[in-house]
Amino acid sequence: KQADCVSTMTYNEYWQVIDAGLPAEELIVFKYEDQGVATLEDGLYVLESTLDDAAMVDKYTRFVRASMKGWAYAAEHPEEAAEIVLENDATGAQTEKHQVRMVGEINKLVDGSDGKLDMAAYERTVKSLLSGGSDPVITKEPEGATTTVVTDGL
């Protein structure tokens, strides 16, 4: 109860608030998606010059394919996925309950994705980042910021 308003991720901090003792029914949740201001976060970011190297593009494509395969496996085996995280948590801060719950929430986010960039989500992100009034995050629409060369092979 140290803040009146917090920004959280549905797969992580939201549940930390719940676990800290605030019941979900006491929270008012505004989802960015519902407000039209959701932005992309995670992605594959590479140096443009590496996209001219067929071997590198192949590595990137295999990485995306393996990542999507890993997410699919985690979706089907959340307890095993949680155990893998716990085995590699040097801090000891993670719990199985939290990790299993996060897998369930991430599943909602990646459901139906094949690893390719959702261009509508990209356009919405650019629009949102440009719309900061006198202090926008970006001041002009990016040029050449996306490519499908890596995911064309999926």
Image (cartoon, rainbow, N blue to C red):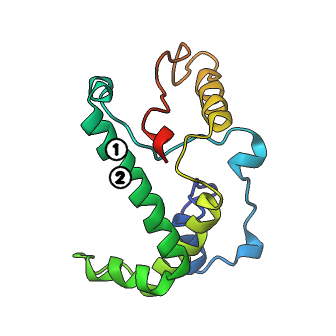
For numbered disc 1, what is the local secondary structure?
helix
Return the x and y of residue 121 as percentages of the image width and height: 65, 38
Q: Does residue 35 sit above or below 103 in this rendering?
A: above
Label 2 is placed on what type of residue?
A: Phe
Return the x and y of residue 152 as percentages of the image width and height: 50, 38
The image quarter containing residue 113 is bottom right
The image quarter containing residue 134 is top right
Q: Quadrant of the N terminus?
A: bottom right
Identify which residue, 1 or 94, lies in the foreground: 94
Return the x and y of residue 116 as percentages of the image width and height: 54, 44
Q: Does residue 46 sit above or below 9 in this rendering?
A: above
Q: Residue at x 52, y 69 (%)?
A: 72
Q: Residue at x 68, y 38 (%)?
A: 37
Identify which residue, 20 or 128, lies in the foreground: 128
Q: Residue at x 68, y 34 (%)?
A: 120
For numbered disc 2, what is the local secondary structure?
helix
Question: How many marks do you count on the picture?
Answer: 2
Residue 35 visible within the image: yes
Q: Which residue is mark 2?
A: 63
Horizontal side of 38 relative to 83 (left or right) equals right
**Marks 1 and 2 in Cβ contact (< 8 Å):** yes
Label 1 is placed on what type of residue?
A: Tyr
Q: CA distance from mark 1 to mark 2?
A: 5 Å
Identify which residue, 66 or 94, lies in the foreground: 66
Residue 20 visible within the image: no
Q: What is the crowding at mark 1: few (fewer than 14 residues within 10 Å), some, or many (at least 20)?
A: many
Horizontal side of 12 relative to 126 (left or right) equals left
Q: Which residue is mark 1?
A: 60
Q: Residue at x 56, y 40 (%)?
A: 117
